[in-house]
Image (cartoon, rainbow, N blue to C red):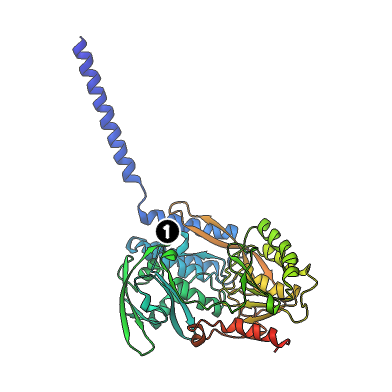
Amino acid sequence: MIHQTRRRAVGFCRWVLCSASLLTLAACAQEPTLAERWAMDIDALQHELESRHIDLYHSISQTELTEQLEAIKRQLPDLTQPEIMVALMRTIQQVGDGHTQFSYWGAPHHRFPLRLQLFESELRVIGTDQNNPDLLGMRLHAVDDTPLPEVIERLKPVQMGVENAYSERHQLTSTLPVAEVLNGLGVTRSIQSAEFVFMDDEGKLHTRSLTSLPADKAPQAVTITLEPDLPEGFVPNRLSLDGLKLYLQPGQSTAYLRFDRYPTQRQMERFARGLKTEFSRQGIQRVIVDLRHNGGGDLFVGLTLAWGLILIDDLDWKNGIYVLTGPQTFSAAMSNSAQFRQLLNARLVGEPTGANPVGYQDADTFQLPHSGWTVMYSKRLYRFQETETEGVQPDVLIVPDWEQFKNGVDNQLQWVLQALQNGHIQ
């Protein structure tokens, strides 16, 4: 009797295990495929943008957006992950504002160890890793047998953060080193490595095999850089913060503030309060605020800087305040450049900003449910000047000069210093 009971128990256990295995197999069979998960994410993408964006269809109709997204969904079984990414980037770019983005930064990605900058039509290497110091200053010529002009044409329709021709130029330099983008566009054969061809000033070609790195490690690998020196006489000041560097030139009564990134509101309040004491102690009367490398943040933090400066009566409020701008001046930095012109009587010098003074801004994000991809969208419509222009136009247009740049001279900053020295506005 005991043995029969045991046999029945064992048989029952086997039946349970077998049934559980069958249920597991059935569950696995019902798991959505990668293509099905992406199809659901694309539906979620459109739904969330429609419910969150202030005016999603200001540049593309609902019918056009839906048709393009449906076309991508039909192609999903035949697309790689990088190809899905660039297809969605191409479609979302047509929403028509730089703060609405389905971009490579929304998920883990890789970059080649290059820092690039456009000088007129020449794409120059201004940063590289320790294995390729000789590439510094060379022009990019081709990538994996694809000539640079063709690479650029493929990149243009998928670049995110573009509002005008100026941000398009900047985003080219930022997007081109992204391995997944190049691979998704069919420029490179692999995400891991690619053959880059460079041309020196004598016209000689140099081919280099570069290996991509995770995006969080690539910036640290670019250790060989070419960047203009700060003019003689400027001394770093103790008030400086990360991304907000203050330099004083007491002999010329001038302060230079390189404003690359926004600190917290509390940090900026302390910084702004400290300026009055520091400027008085050093006899500072003129201020240069450099927003050329600032991609945005909280415009109200920037206004706190303006508040701190306005409290300083000893500044030359007629001719002594300048702001440097360029294609990378985006979002809040663009807003602050327009506001500094109004609030500080600042003279804007350099190139037009990458963001437009009238347009959709104030970004927020959400994540797609299956891929976890982060998507950005615009929440507000701002008007920072009465007339609509391609970027905030500078009062004095000066483009970077390669011949001076390679010799360590910042010709835009030098122009401002010369104007201040002459004591008049040109």
Q: Quadrant of residue 115?
A: bottom left
Vertical placement of 103 versus 44: above or below?
Answer: below
Query: Can residue 145 be seen here?
Result: no
Q: Amino acid at mark 1?
A: Pro
Q: How many marks?
A: 1
> In the image, 385: left or right of 171?
right
Residue 168: x and y in percent read: 51, 77
Vertical placement of 399 versus 157: above or below?
Answer: below
Residue drawn where x is 57% and y is 66% of the image: 99
Vertical placement of 377 versus 31: above or below?
Answer: below
> In the image, 14: left or right of 334?
left
Residue 304: x and y in percent read: 71, 63
Image quarter in which the N terminus is found: top left
Residue 372: x and y in percent read: 46, 53
Q: Nearer the viewer, residue 354 or 113?
A: 113
Rate crowding at label 1 as few (under 14), some (14 to 19) or many (20 or more) other CA atoms within 10 Å: few
Q: Nearer the viewer, residue 273 or 353?
A: 273
Image quarter in which the C terminus is found: bottom right
Q: Nearer the viewer, residue 110 or 222?
A: 222
From this viewpoint, which residue is outermost toward the left?
3
From this viewpoint, which residue is outermost toward the right?
313
**Mark 1 residue element:** loop
Query: Can residue 62 be seen here?
Result: yes
Residue drawn where x is 54% and y is 61% of the image: 376
Q: Quadrant of residue 77?
A: bottom left
From this viewpoint, which residue is outermost toward the top?
1
Residue 16: x and y in percent read: 28, 28
Pointer 1: what residue? 108
